[in-house]
Image: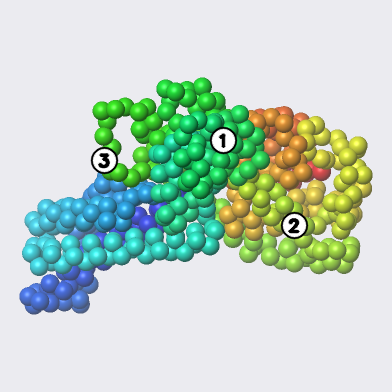
Amino acid sequence: MGMTRRNVLLIMFKLFDVMLLVGSLIAASITSGRAVSTISLTKFLAMRVSVRNFVLFMILVILWHGLFSFLELYESKRLWRQYTEAMDVLKATSIATFVLFLVGSPFFPSITNPLSLVLFWSLSTDSVLLSRHLLRYLLGQIRRRGRNTHHILIVGTNPRAVRLARELETQSVLGYRILGFVDKKWPGMEEFGKSGYPLACDFQGFRSFVRANVVDEVVITVPIKSFYREASRIAAVCEEQGIITHFLSNLFDLKQVRTKDDFVDYDSLVTLNVGLSQGWGLAIKRMLDIVISLVSIICLAPLFLITAFLIAITTPGPIFFVQKRVGLNKRPISVYKFRTMVADAEAKIGELEHLNEVSGPVFKIKNDPRVTRLGKYLRKSSIDELPQLLNVLKGDMSLVGPRAMAVRDFAGFDQDWHRRRFSVRPGITCLWQVNGRSSIPFEKWMELDMEYIDKWSLWLDLRILVKTIPAVLKGSGAA
């Protein structure tokens, strides 16, 4: 699952856990109260909400949340068996029950009697376990249909590399797709061939492979001592192109170190990430994308209809122009725009190559003969790009991010450091938009994209969004 979407779901999951614990407390209190004839649902709901009670309740909730986080219930245990996860949940709810006893006994003895505590422990354990089982099932159904998959390339063909691949594939709910393995010829290659996994390339072909394929993550399993030069080169290529890199925790072949289990714990890997920093900020970024794009689509619906009507009556052809572009980690996406050119504009691009006025692989002509009269105004005002709000809502794009590159333009990239821009979700606007758009040279455009990735923050996104409005109104750099 993509990290942005995962962070949004993680926030919701944490809130849901708190709701389960609070619900278990209420249910346990009412049930035990009825059993001893001390409290009913009506009496429970009629309890006076004082400042003291509210503060105590919030302390309890914060302690519960901190406990679940401390016990790593929100860490992605991708390759942990369900039994291991169940034992962690049992440990967390048991301590949560003890915390309830400590906090509640001096102030609420009627709802912290032995029966209430036993019921709370039982209800909270069952509900938390059930929620995680349902989550695994739902994610599994989604990923079995090919959605939210992550493409992984494994460096090394040793037994632990094969074991990692088998662990990833046997648990289809994880949504990982093994692209292949990277290694040179060695005596163990014959044994690796029996595994049935493909050899994607050798060490020399690694750079070319990641250039041409969708690669989300790379796992390096070769021992550092013997393969330092190869491993360092691969890590450097991944850093240059913005690919997440993992190293196995037992990479150094230390003979006296024993692992905790006989299976690979994927999240115990050492991870290098040169994309956007993860966490709450990225989750908030995605939530803002959803809210702003949805509200904008609703508010701009009349403008959408008017524009569509004008396109339909002024030029023959479809209302929307749907173009294949390169998205996150070089995945192909379909980007929507209002059509501003003649219907066969794509077929005519070869005839106009010699008129290209922009450096680098991109193609731009200030007075493009393919642009219609209405299209000139739509481009000048950036109205033609409004349908991309649908891409933002879908999750293919963000409001702010590097421009989604056309497949033709991407094919002309000759510098690997340019490809790091694909390590983040493309956007409708970014630093290039507020600094002149088509008027800036290609190299400067790429530098601005790298600056955005390296300095990203929510505050930067908000500044770019605010600066985009006057840039669009002025029509600066539009072509």
Residue receiving disc 2: 322
Q: Is residue 365 left or right of residue 410?
A: right
* CB within 8 Å, label 3 to label 1: no
Q: x%, y% of residue 125?
A: 23, 62
Q: x%, y% of residue 113?
A: 8, 64
Look at the numbered disc 2 and give the secondary structure of its residue.
strand
Q: Is residue 99 left or right of residue 329?
A: left
Q: x%, y% of residue 393?
A: 59, 58
Residue 373 appears in the rendering: yes
Look at the numbered disc 1 and give the secondary structure of its residue.
loop
Choose mark 3 or mark 1, whichever is in front.
3
Of the pair 112 and 98, the residue shown nearer to us? 98
* CB within 8 Å, label 2 to label 1: no
Residue receiving disc 3: 260
Instruction: Tell me which numbered mark, 3 or 1, is placed earlier along the sequence.
Output: 1
Residue at 33% across, 50% down = 80
Image quadrant of residue 31? Answer: bottom left
Q: Say above or below: 311 vs 416.
A: below
Instruction: Give the residue type that dot 2 points to.
Output: Val
Residue at 62% across, 32% down = 205
Image quadrant of residue 29? Answer: bottom left
Instruction: Give the residue type that dot 3 points to.
Output: Lys
